[in-house]
Structures are given as C-alpha cells and as structure tokens.
Image: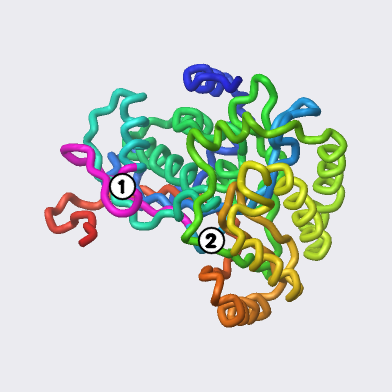
Amino acid sequence: MSPSVSDRTGAILKCHSIIQDRYFHLIDRSSSNSQLPATVVEVHAPARLHMGFIDVSGVLGRRFGSIGVALSELGVSMRLTRSQQLNVKGFQQQRGLEYARQFLDAYEINHCVDIMIDQAIPEHAGLGSGTQLAMSIGMGLNRLFELQNSLEEIAALMGRGNRSGIGIGAFCQGGLVVDGGRASNTVIPPVISQLPIPANWRFILILDQSASGIHGDKEIQAFDQLPEFPAHLVEHLSYRLLMCGLPAVIEKDLPVFGSVISELQQCVGDHFAELQGGRFTSSAVEEAVQWFAAQGAVGLGQSSWGPTGFCIIDDHVAAQNMIDSANRQLRHLQLEFMLATASESGASVQTLDIPKDPCLQLTDYA
C-alpha cells in the first residue's frame, strides 16, 4: 500500500541533502532581487513520453521502474500573480483550480491568486498532463508565496510519483529519464539515469483525439487487476535497458536503442492488453505504428495508457518526409502526426517584478 500524503510529506523532510541538491535546481531567471515580493511568476514545463515499465508487479522487489523522455513541442505554460481571490483562466481551468486549492489549503494560504494557463498538454493522452500541470501550479505558488519547499515536498503534496518518476524527472531536468521504481518505503521513485538525447533524433507522435487512455480511479483499479509480470522478463528487460539501451543513447546508436524500446513496449503492451483492448489503446494508432515501422522508424510504441503512439527517426528531414507521407497514405485513420524533439532543460520557474498597473492584467480568453 502506498504511504498517505502526510506520511509521504513527512518522509520527504528527512531526505538526504544530496537528493534535494539534485532536484532543487529549476532555472531561476529572476529579473530582480530575490528578497522582493513576486508580482508575476511564469512557469514552463515540458510534456513527456512514458516508454514503459520494467517491473510493473514488483516480482523482484521494487515495483514499476520506467523510462521516458521530456518533449519540447508540447507542455504547460502559465502565469501566476497575487489577487483578491482565487481565479484560474485559460486551459484546463477546473483541473487547475483543484490543484491550486490543494496547495493553498495544505499551507493555509488565503485563496488570493490569479492563474492564467496559456498552454496545457492534452488530457488523458499519455503525455503527462496531470503531473506537469500539478507540478507547475505547485512550484509556481511555492515561488509566488516564497515558501522555499523542495520539489519532492511539492510532488508528494500534489500526489505525483505514485507509480512512475518519469514526469517528475522530466519536470526537473528533462532529457531521457529512467526511474528506479518503488520499494516499500519509497516516497518519490528515484531517478537513476538522466541522459541527453542525441540532437538529431526526432520523435514522431501519433495522436488520436477520438480515444482516451485509462485514467483516474480506473487506472488505479487497472494496476490492481494486472496479472503478475514474469520474473524472467523483468530480468531480461533490465539487462536490455542497462547494458544495451542506455549505452546506445550515449553512443548515438538509434537502431540499438530503438530495438530496446520496441521490445519493452511489446512486453508491456501484451501485459496490459486485456485491460486496454489490445497492445494499443487505439487500433488506429496501432495501424499507424505498423506503417511507420515499415518505413524504417524504430523505437515504436504507446506512451503510458495511450492513446498516443510514437516512433523515432535519426534525421529531421527524413522524419518530416515520413509525416508528410503518413498524412497522405493514412488519411482514413483520422490521426494527427507531430514532429517532436527532446527537451533537455526541464521546467523553468521565472519571477518577474512588474510594477502594479491596472493596464497590466493577465490576458483573458474570449
């Protein structure tokens, strides 16, 4: 059973300073002295691909463990400023309002904030919308009210990292992230590897707006219903990732890295098949993934519960040409194809001290 929020928060306060030093490094490009009250806080955070779990059942001790990558082209952007009451505008307002109340109530802060969400990640698409929005609001409010809480404390408060540490790792530093899963006393799954993606690698995202991945209470129930993941597969996939996949990233060997991701995806997809209706949540995405494989793409799979699929190409022009061909030949699937690159910087939290002026109001949406 996972620790309660209070247990998780309490445990985080005891974390070793080395852990805090590693994560509490988000970019501060403040334009003025940090002693001054913040007028506006801007937060930008990348989306993420979740490329699969290593030991979803914990048959060898630690449960879950996963690999993923931060993405530049999709993400969360917001502005926070003090106000007379709590007001959330822009994208995903209700979800943002819930996260803001959760944070403000926990620290007994008056609900006196304006939050403008200028950009958000598509919900329930397997791209980390919940974690990135929750962490953005938590870190933004933390800066706005000068609370000095660590990223781990905020993650625990916002209920993130219950299974995977990929979203938190992507928020923190970006790049390719591997987390070590959960033991019985784990608070936040530790990031055990974080590598830059070779600059020429491109990700093709396969988006199906007509489908939705398992989420919320159904996701919790789904993990409880999964059969035990075979121990021999855990051992095999661990070796493949550690001794083949990660060295291949450093050596810029996309065919080897892609083969590891494809194999991991096949094993995990088959294990989840009964709950999501097949190896892929969306049959249209599955057909498109097979088409991309025939064109020479590697690292094929589904991000998290989907429906978003992905593949990897080692050249920008080749990837764009492949997308152009897909738009012509796969039109009947009614999918969207997006070219994406890895985000190597993670989230930024920027404090702006702007003079109070009635003309400087956060832009509303018509």
Q: Residues within 10 Å of mark 1 (few under 14, many from 20)?
A: some
Left or right: 359, with 299 as reference point: left
What residue is pinned by disc 2? 72
Left or right: 40, with 64 as reference point: left
Residue visible at 26% across and 50% down?
89
Q: Which mark is residue 69?
A: none
Q: Which mark is residue 93?
A: 1
Instruction: Look at label 1 and name its amino acid.
Output: Gln
Residue 62 counted in the magenta span? no
Residue visible at 22% across and 57% down?
364
The colour scheme used to paint the residues is: rainbow
Query: In the image, residue 326 lies at what x, y percent?
Result: 61, 77
Above or below for 67 versus 7: below
In terms of secondary structure, where does tag 2 sit? Answer: strand
- Identify which residue, 242 or 293, lies in the foreground: 293
Left or right: 324, with 216 as reference point: right
Residue visible at 74% across and 40% down?
54
In terms of secondary structure, where does tag 1 sit? Answer: helix
Instruction: Look at label 2 and name its amino acid.
Output: Ser
Query: In the image, residue 212 lies at what x, y percent?
Result: 50, 51
Query: In the image, residue 13 lies at what x, y percent?
Result: 53, 21
Q: Are marks 2 and 1 in contact (CB under 8 Å)?
A: no
Quadrant in which the N terminus is drawn: top right
Residue span colored magenta: 75-94
Q: Is residue 68 visible?
A: yes
Above or below for 328 versus 181: below
Name which of mark 2 and mark 1 comes first in the sequence: 2
Above or below for 105 versus 124: above
Q: Residues within 10 Å of mark 2 (few under 14, many from 20)?
A: some
Distance (Cα) linking label 2 and label 1: 23 Å
